[in-house]
Each structure stands twice: as structure tokens, then as C-alpha cells.
Image (tube, rainbow, N blue to C red):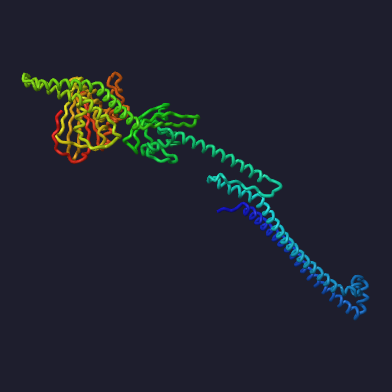
Amino acid sequence: MFLSLNRKIIYSIFSLFLISTIIFSSTFYVVYSSKIEKDQQASITRNTQYTDLLHRNVLLIKELRDLAKKNPNIRHTLKNYPQIKDLVSDTAHTNFLANEQKNITQRTKLFDEGYQTIYQGTTIILFNTVLLSLFIIFIGYLFNRWVLIPINTISTISEEITKGNLHLRIPARKKIKYQDELDRFSSIFNQMLDNIENMISTIKDKENFLQSLIDNIPDGIRVIDEKYNIVIANKAYYKQSSDTPKQAQKCYASSFCLKQPCINEQCPMYEILQKGKERTSTIQQFASNPGKYLSVNAALMQYDKSHRYVVEAIRDLSDDIDFSHQQKITSLGFLSSSIAHEIKNNLGALRIILEHIIEKNVLSKNTDKEHKRLLQTLHNELVNTINIPERLLKMTRYASQEETEFDCITSLGEIIQMLDFEAKRKGIFLEFKYPKKELLLQGNETDFKIAVINIIQNAINATDHKGSIDIKVSSSQKNGITISFTDTGVGIAEEDIEYIFTPFYSQGQQNKDSKTAGSGLGLPITKSIVEKFGGQISVKSKIGEGTNFTLSFPTHKKTCNKTKQVL
């Protein structure tokens, strides 16, 4: 319950004064009135006894006078007792009883005057009490106006300031000639509020500048304190984590939806704060988007001895994968253009010459059938050779990610035909098995071919001379379309299989002597493309025996029987 200081002071003074007045008045009245009453009672008792004795004395004197009148001898005898003689003969003593009664009445009147004095004193005390009460009220009014009202105003303004209303100020008193301590305090208090508001405004401007600065950084940025709280983060990070800015949000809750800190080597906080590293890098996948790989570079920031922070720069590797994907398409396009430019004209000239030779030999009756068959076979192979640059150019032609319906067997045949020369050069046998029907996929055909190229090229690089690569296509209503790539290469260690789809992880890079080290983006790109088609990719491998990659796609529409040309 709130009780103002004004009331506390007035109530306390008034109660103290009232209690003291009552005690003083009661004590004064009881003590003095009791004493006067006792004195009066004693005086009355004494006067009564004295009056009784006087009455008896008067009666005795009267009897002596009567006896003296009746008996002269007694009068003569009284001469020997002068006091008794004077008492009997002095008539003045006969009236002293009446005089004494007057004295008693006078003394009683004095007692009444004493009581009246007590009553008057009590009245004076009560009157002084009233005057003192009015004086206290007046003092309370001045105290309230000069002290309590300003303090109450300061208290109210302070309470509003704690709620964030920094624009409020203590109003200055109008038409005041002399300032007191509270006026100076109010002025200093208002000046302090002005300084605080200016400082907070400056801090907010700097915070907004800092936030705007890091928001314009394309990579995700976040700063974490020792208690795993995200102190500051930019828009790119919240987009990566699909989270919203929250006060005192824990990093492990924001990134991985965990309730406890993650204590492992993949956690930058653990590596820096627990193991004492100054910098660390890792690849992570946030819980909100497990299909994306994020490169996290973290460093220790310590601006004093008692505060340590971890600054993380988070890059979405999807952009690097897409860029690498586009680079491969561009490189293949450039390669196709170069091949078409370099050999197409020469092959065309050879084709014209060969067709002229065939025309002459076909019309000639001297040419045997075997010679004619060989010339026709040579012509067919030359035509197929001329078509290779055309197919390569068609495959690398970027179609702005246009999705179409295409036959995956036809696309696979074109890729195998293009890579068959490289495989044969290494002494590797390519075998392609497929059903005699059309298997349709819905998506970007160029992306599909890039995914297949990545897998076959990896198999060629991993397979030694006289090895083999089997490519098998199957379909069923339950499992959809399945494409299997099986090689007899060196294989992949079991502990490495979980990392092969991680961006920038290359098995060749793990072996410094390996000549097959790549960028580590081929398989992540392949996995991303397969998932874009709504499919899945799985791997089985054994060191020294080979590797199997299996791509599973949902069937776009019912397949129809159609005879295919065997490559």
C-alpha cells in the first residue's frame, strides 16, 4: 500500500502532538485536581472538628456566664482565674463562632477558585492545541509545496523514464525569484536526461549503421558470446537459418534446434572457447534446410580481458556449386564450339570425298560387295563422328533452366558416346544396359547430363587399365526409374562415404600424391541436381573392389514400348 511522504509526516506530527497533549492535560488535571480535592477534604474535616469545639466552648461560656450571674461567689472565685474571667466577661468572644464560619466559607470559596483555575488552564491548553494544529497544517502545506510536490514530480518522471520515455522532463516552476536545492536538482536532472538521450540516440545511430553494414554483407554474419547468445546477426544469416531475430537467442537453438550446446569438432564455439583455437573452419547443415551446405569460418574476438566473442562468417556453398556448375557448362560449351570449329569442316570435307568415292564404286561393276560394305561402314562412322560435336554443343546449350520432358535413355546414350573415347584411351570398357522402351523424365536435360558426366568421369578416373564401368537402367511402377553406375575402381573408404557429397571434399585431395584431385564440387552438384528432379542418390563402395552409384527418379508418366538403337 502506497502512503505519500506528506501524509506520513503530517500524520506522525499530529499523532505525536495529540498524544502528548492528552497525556499532559490528563496528568495536569488528575494531579492538581486530586491534590486540591484532598486539601479541601482535609480542610473540611478540620473545620468541622474546629467548629464543633468552638460550639462546645461557646455553650460552656454561656453556662459559666449564667452560673456567674446566679451565684456571686463563683464570680468572686473567677478572679483567681484571669483567663476564664476574661472569657466569661468578654462578650466579643461570643461572636467568634460566626466569624469562624465566615472564614470557612471564604476558604471554601478559595477552593472553588482553584478548580476554576484548573478549568481555565485546561481550556488554554486545548486552545493552544488547536493553534498548534493549525500551525502544523500550515507547516505541512509549505513542506508539501516546497519539498514533497517536487520530489513526487521527480519520482513520477523517473518512473516514466524507466519505461523508456526519455523525452520527459521535470517542469520548471513559474515566476520563482529564489531557487532552492530542489530547483537546482531538477535542472541538473533535466540536463542529465538530455545527455542520456543524446548518447542513446548516438548509440542507436551507430547500432543502425553497424546493422546496416553487416546486413549488406552477402555472407551470413553472427557474433556469439560465451553463453552461446547471438549478440548480433545480419539478414543473410537469418535467411540461411530460416530464423527470426530474437533477444538472447542461443546459437545452437537457432541453427540446429537443439536444447544443449553441441560439443564436437564441428562446433566453432567448442573449438575456440574450449580448445583455445583462434580460428576454425567447418562445413555445416542447418536444421531448417538440411539440403544446403554452409561453410562456417569462425574467429575469436576479445576486446578486453573479461569478454570473449566468436565471430562467424557463414557462406552458402550453393552459390559456389551453381557457379561451378555454370563454369562446367560454359567450359563444355567452349570445348564443343572449339571441336566443332576445328574438326567439323575437315570431317565434312572427308565426308564429301568419301561419298564421291562410294558413288563411283557403287556404280562400278568391278567393285566387290565386301569393298562396298567397308566403304559404307566408313561413311556411317564418319557421319557419327561429325554428329559428336553437334551432340556436345546441343548438350551444353544453356536453356535458362527450362524444364522439358526428355528420354533419359537417349540422354545417357549421348553422354556415353561422348565419353567412350576417353574410357577406351585408358583401356576401360563401358557397358550400357537399358530396357527397350522410352523412360521419360521431367526437368532440365542439361542438368541431368551434367550429373551423369560427373559420375562417369569420376568412375573413369578411379578405374585402372582393363577395368570396366557398367551402366544399367531399369524401371518399375513401384520404384520408378533407377540408373546404376558400377565401376571396378579403387573404391571409397567407409569413413569417407558420408563426406563425398560435402562441397570441396575430394577423395583425391586427401591423398597428396593423387593425380585425380578435383575441386570437390562434382558430387555435390550431382546430388543437388538429382534432388531437384525429386530423386535420390545412394552409394555403395568397398576399397579395392569398386563403387556403385544409384540414381532413383520418380516416373514422369507411363512408359510406352519403343525399340531403341543399341550403341
Pinpoint residue 467: horizontal percent, then vertical percent.
Answer: 18, 22
Pinpoint residue 398: horizontal percent, then vertical percent.
Answer: 29, 31
Pinpoint residue 72: horizontal percent, then vertical percent.
Answer: 93, 79
Residue 426 picture quarter = top left
- The image shows residue 278, relative to residue 77, as above or below, that is above
Q: Nearer the viewer, residue 36 or 316?
A: 316
Q: Nearer the viewer, residue 35 or 359?
A: 359
Q: Is residue 545 visible?
A: no
* Residue 310 relative to residue 402: left or right: right
Residue 230 picture quarter = top left
- The image shows residue 57, relative to residue 567, as above or below, that is below
Pinpoint residue 207: horizontal percent, then vertical percent.
Answer: 49, 36
Quarter of the image with the C terminus in it: top left
- The image shows residue 78, relative to residue 171, as above or below, that is below
Q: Nearer the viewer, residue 470 or 548?
A: 470
Residue 111 picture quarter = bottom right
